[in-house]
Image: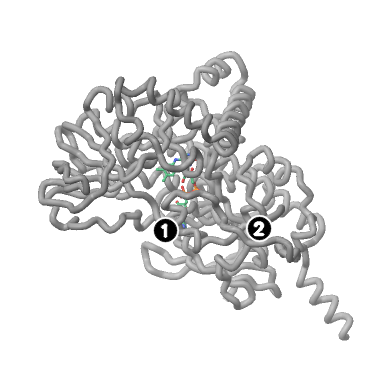
Amino acid sequence: MTLEHVDVLIVGAGLSGVGAACHLETQLPGKSYAILEARDSIGGTWDLFRYPGIRSDSDMYTLGYSFRPWSEAKAIADGPAILDYVKQTASDFGVDGKIRYKHRVVRAEWSTARSRWTVEAERTDTGQTARLTCGFLFMCSGYYRYDEGYTPELPGRERFAGPIVHPQFWTDDVDYAGKRVVVIGSGATAVTLVPAMAETAAHVTMLQRSPSYVVSLPAEDSIANLARRLLPAKLAYSIVRWKNVMIQLLVFQLSRRRPRYMKALIRRGLEHRLPPGYDIDTHFKPRYNPWDQRMCLVPDGDLFEAIGSGRASVVTDRIETFTETGLELASGAELEADLIVTATGLNLVPLGGMQISVDGRDVELPGTMAYKGMMLAGVPNLAVALGYTNASWTLKCDLTCEYVCRLLRHMDERGYSQATPENRDPSITAVPFIDFTSGYVLRAIDKFPKQGSKPPWRLYQNYARDIVTLRFGALEDGAMVFSNPESDLDADERLAA
Ligand SMILES: Cc1cc2nc3c(=O)[nH]c(=O)nc-3n(C[C@H](O)[C@H](O)[C@H](O)COP(=O)(O)OP(=O)(O)OC[C@H]3O[C@@H](n4cnc5c(N)ncnc54)[C@H](O)[C@@H]3O)c2cc1C
């Protein structure tokens, strides 16, 4: 049976998958492609998460696509506005019609002899298996599991009489108006939930084991709004994007090189925002350095305002046990609650949980090395859209898409059907893919491929550097091996004859 074939198969219709398809539409309009999406809707993260206050924690001038200006007034945008942006982009570029929903990709097998992937997807509606082939596989499946969030062992959880909700599975009927709420966690989700719920709850307590760095930023970027009034939309967007890229880079570099200075700066911000005499040391002074873990951002200091008004509070302690009416803490204190929210994080998963094989041999991801943070050693014609951990996701994904389009064009021009990164330099050693100490990273890092100690295997997490290597760097760099096994086979057969 002949299977349907496309030039490029994109897995995932979130921010990255839609972006990848737009790049193909504009840069390689002759290529056939399809998008397989496990869920029944577009938008990925921005459709899945429905908890109160859901928003970005980086600015939309860098989280937005390079090719489509963000035109809303708010730079730190609400989830529904981001979802709308993704949907509108998909519609404007005509990529929405290419999405096949309810197709969960489970397996992809590469054949060198045929220079193609055979991809297997489970139909989540009918349970049937769909198969198709493609010349290039572009994984835009995000980085975490959709079917489960992370919840640590919570002693005595079954004793609690009220509802316990994980933010990943929030539904509209979670009622918190006038209720006492405890949010367990100290990450981006917790600091978003607390001020949003505090608007109508009786009181919201953020219960954390240890503090995170929390920084306030204006929800609206006044320079961006001014630039938009004075300049054409695309020019204004590009200027503001670069301004914000430089600020993100500066903050990250300062954090890594001058952590004490950065800590003092953050502290000054907290002292300014929080009520006089507030115990910053206990609740907002982490044990690690800034940007050893992702920093939490709060728009217009909304979290601090909620604390200042008494509608919210922070408790730094450990849970001894759940009780019928709340939580008993290691310090002996008790927290009464009507509703408990476990903002305890995500479970990371590489390649959307898919298994890949090359010429009949399964690829074990932890044993492979990532090339430029987006392809895999020994795995032909496959790229992964993964964003930065220290800056907006889309900055890297846009560059990855540009690189893939350049690579495909180069292969067409030279008659290559296969591009495989190969590490032939024994002096390059394997190091963990991400150098973050966050729990969600440490829990999953052994499932991910490694990065290498030197370029092009080193992952720099640096947009300016990546522009040079991904947009302008040589494709034939010695590590990327191009071939055309079919024509090599023909030549061998001709010789044998
Ligand atoms: C609450 C929250 C807030 C965030 N805020 C920011 C922020 O402010 N800035 C930032 O830079 N990043 C942020 N992130 C990271 C965020 O996930 C990225 O910014 C971005 O949305 C990721 O887009 P994506 O398309 O790569 O992945 P996702 O949004 O995760 O989309 C992946 C898509 O692939 C589909 N998929 C997965 N596996 C398969 C499979 N096997 N077969 C078929 N389909 C599959 C999924 O169903 C999903 O639709 C946030 C993440 C979360 C959870």
The amino acid type, in three-letter code, at marker 2 is Gly
Q: Are marks 2 and 1 in contact (CB under 8 Å)?
A: no
The amino acid type, in three-letter code, at marker 1 is Lys
Above or below, 222 against 181 in this view is above
- Of label 2 and label 1, which has the lower sequence position? 1
Number of disc labels: 2
Q: Which residue is mark 1?
A: 102
Of the two numbered discs 2 and 1 in the rendering, the one whose residue sits closer to the viewer: 2
Q: Which mark is residue 184?
A: none
Helix, strand or loop at disc 1?
loop
Mark 2: C-beta under 8 Å from nearest atom of ligand 1: no
Alpha-carbon distance for marks 2 and 1?
Answer: 36 Å
Q: Which residue is mark 2?
A: 452
> Relative to the observer, which residue lies in front, 41 or 363?
363
Q: Report the residue at 53% width, 61% height from top.
A: 448
Crowding near pointer 1: few (<14 within 10 Å), some, many (20+)? some
**Res 51 quadrant in image:** top left
Q: Report the residue at 36% width, 40% height from top.
A: 211
In the rendered image, the quadrant that contains the C terminus is bottom right
Mark 1: C-beta under 8 Å from nearest atom of ligand 1: no
In the rendered image, the quadrant that contains the N terminus is bottom right
